[in-house]
Amino acid sequence: MVSAAEQLAANLNFGALAKAEELKKRIWFTLGALVVFRLGTYIPLPGIDSAAFEAAFLAYGSVDVAFNNAGISPPEDDSILTTGLDAWRRVQEVNLTSVYLCCKEAIPYMQRQGKGSIINTASFVAVMGSATSQISYTASKGGVLALSRELGVQFAREGIRVNALCPGPVNTPLLTELFAADPERAARRLVHVPVGRFAEPSEIAAAVAFLASDDASFITASTFLVDGGISGAYVTPL
């Protein structure tokens, strides 16, 4: 039986074999009609983002949902006084430019079919400032929020919804690794979460599934906060 990944590769007429091979590297996993690509974590390759969406469309006949979930937070991204231009650009490329590229490719498919939902992962830091700075990360997620809001308004009359998912800290390997190296930093952040813990990935996934579904048909251009109450808190419980 041909796997979804093999079908995707077979259905696409690439201009060069190298592009086909690169796309296959970026297929993370497939589940039924769900195709998950790793796009934003790679150095941009001309045409690879369009190739991914074309492959999905040819394999399944539509592009109904695009979930752009890119994010890195390297230790070099710190205060504006110490963060170098290379670190700034690297974070912007992965966190913001990749979202721009994927939205740019997804929207024409959704325009033709008259519907679609795009969910872009921003962050609670897009709506709040922090004295523990990650300047490029914060700026990139603010950009994702503004981009999503504008696209949500621009394409609303065409049946395309675009929302910015703004999670609080999530219990992922990236966060675990970051805070394991600096427990004091973790404690400073955790104290601001009213529910007293970081989010689990399944809780964020549930929010994405909701925004992708018809249950969210009247929600677009939103700042969809899933942050354990951080953005609404002045002080937190002891």
Image (cartoon, rainbow, N blue to C red):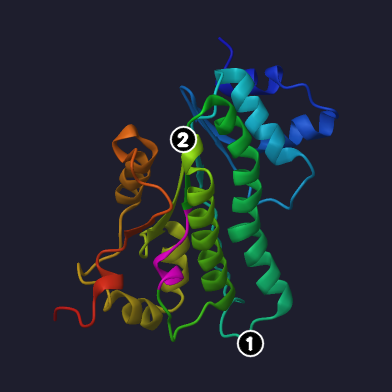
Q: Label 1, secondary structure: give it.
A: loop
User: Pointer 2: what residue?
Assistant: 159
Nearer-the-camera pick, 206 or 101: 101
**102 inside magenta stretch:** no
Does the image show residue 24?
no
User: Pointer 1: what residue?
Assistant: 82
Graded by Cα atoms within 10 Å as few (under 14), some (14 to 19) or many (20 or more), the crowding at tag 1 reads few
- Where's the C terminus, which quadrant? bottom left
Q: Position of residue 109 (x, y in %)?
A: 60, 30
Left or right of residue 210: residue 17: right
Position above or below: 99 against 66: below
> Which residue reaches farthest right?
16
Mark 1 belongs to which amino acid?
A: Thr
Q: What's the CA distance linking mark 1 and mark 2?
A: 44 Å
Does the image show residue 35?
yes
Instruction: Kindly identify the residue that appears in the image at 51 percent across and 54 percent down.
Output: 148
**What is the magenta range?**
121-127
On the image, which quarter does residue 112 sit in? Answer: top right
On the image, which quarter does residue 15 sit in? Answer: top right
> Which residue reaches farthest bottom?
81
**122 inside magenta stretch:** yes
Instruction: Kindly identify the residue that appears in the image at 48 percent across and 23 percent down.
Output: 33
